[in-house]
Structure formats: C-alpha cells, structure tokens
Image (cartoon, helix red, strand yellow):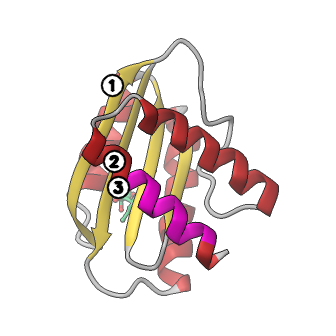
Amino acid sequence: MLQLVYISSSREAVSAAELQRILAASRRNNGRDGITGLLFFDGKRFLQALEGEADKVVAAFERIRDDARHSGVVVLSRREIAEREFGDWAMASRGAPHEEDAMLARVAELAANAAPAVQATFNSFAQVRRRAA
Ligand SMILES: Cc1cc2nc3c(=O)[nH]c(=O)nc-3n(C[C@H](O)[C@H](O)[C@H](O)COP(=O)(O)O)c2cc1C
C-alpha cells in the first residue's frame, strides 16, 4: 500500500459548505477506491494523508492536485506501508477532541522522519490547529 501526505493552500476562503462538498466527494470516491486517510483544514491550508493501493492513491492524488480550490500542493511524505496508519475513515476531518489528538500524534510521527523544514511545517500546522480547537 501507498501512503501519501501533502500540504496545500486554499486558493480563496473555503466556506463550511465548500468543505462539506469536498468531504462528501472524498468519502464517495475514496469508499469506492478503498482509500482512507484524513483531511485537516485550518482555514488557510490543507493537510491530507491518503492511504490505499498505490494506483488508486496516485489516481486520486492526480485529481486532487489539479483541483482549483487549492494551490501550492507539496508532497511531504510518500512511502510504502504494510498497514493503514490513519485508521479506517473514508476521510476524517476534524473529529472529537480525543480523535483529533490521535490524528495529530500520527501526523507528528510522520513528520519525525521528514526533513527539518517539513517537520517545522507540520509542527506549526498542529499548533495552529490546537489554538483553533
Ligand atoms: C483539499 C482537497 C482534498 C480532496 N480530497 C479528495 C479525496 O480524498 N478524494 C477524492 O476523491 N477527492 C478529493 N478532493 C476532490 C477532488 O479534487 C475532485 O474534485 C473530486 O475527486 C472529483 O470527484 P467527482 O468527479 O466524483 O465529483 C479533494 C479536493 C481538495 C481541494
């Protein structure tokens, strides 16, 4: 299986309704394609992890990358995994506080193996999210 994590910037303010549309399409398509993961949005940036069969994840990512609702898509991590690490959500967004802590802990683990600049990005993202919580 492939796990891919990227960060991007929303092109303009994404409303709650727009975010719901993104999540609805994600859950529908990802459920069909056996893709799971998580999607964070802090009001400006997206942070998403996608997990599943490599060809499905690549196809989904190519669609997502071309989405006009965001830009500056940067892949932070791309690696083979034996098992899903973000759980079985078709696409989780902000969940209950304890779930959010678990997701942030996962994200911190991923960042631990990444380059210092990537780690800094993750850490600032997590802090922004905590402040917003
Ligand atoms: C930040 C962001 C994350 C997205 N995540 C997913 C995703 O996980 N899966 C997915 O199928 N589409 C995702 N999308 C939407 C895709 O870009 C695209 O609009 C959608 O896959 C088209 O599906 P449809 O042809 O069924 O409408 C995402 C879009 C954005 C802006």
Asked where in the image residue 68 lies, by quadrant, the reply is: bottom left
**Marks 2 and 3 close (CB-CB < 8 Å):** no
Which secondary structure, mark 3? helix
Residues rendered magenta in the picture: 121-130
The answer to whether the beta carbon of the residue marked 2 is less than 8 Å from any atom of ligand 1 is no
Q: Amino acid at mark 2?
A: Tyr
Q: CA distance from mark 3 to mark 1?
A: 27 Å
Q: Earlier in the sequence, mark 3 or mark 1?
A: 1
Q: Is 127 within the magenta?
A: yes
x, y percent for residue 78: 32, 29
x, y percent for residue 91: 59, 50
Q: Is 106 within the magenta?
A: no
Q: Is residue 5 left or right of residue 92?
A: left
User: How many neighbours does mark 2 have within 10 angstroms: few (below 14), some (14-19), or many (20 or more)?
Assistant: some
In the image shown, does 97 or 64 lie closer to the viewer? 97
In the image shown, does 31 or 110 lie closer to the viewer? 110
Which secondary structure, mark 1? helix
Find disc 2 in the rendering and name its residue.
6
Badge count: 3
Can residue 96 be seen here? The reply is no
Residue at image point 60% right, 75% down: 131
Asked where in the image residue 56 lies, by quadrant, the reply is: top left
Which secondary structure, mark 2? strand
Q: Amino acid at mark 1?
A: Asp
Q: Is residue 43 left or right of residue 115?
A: right
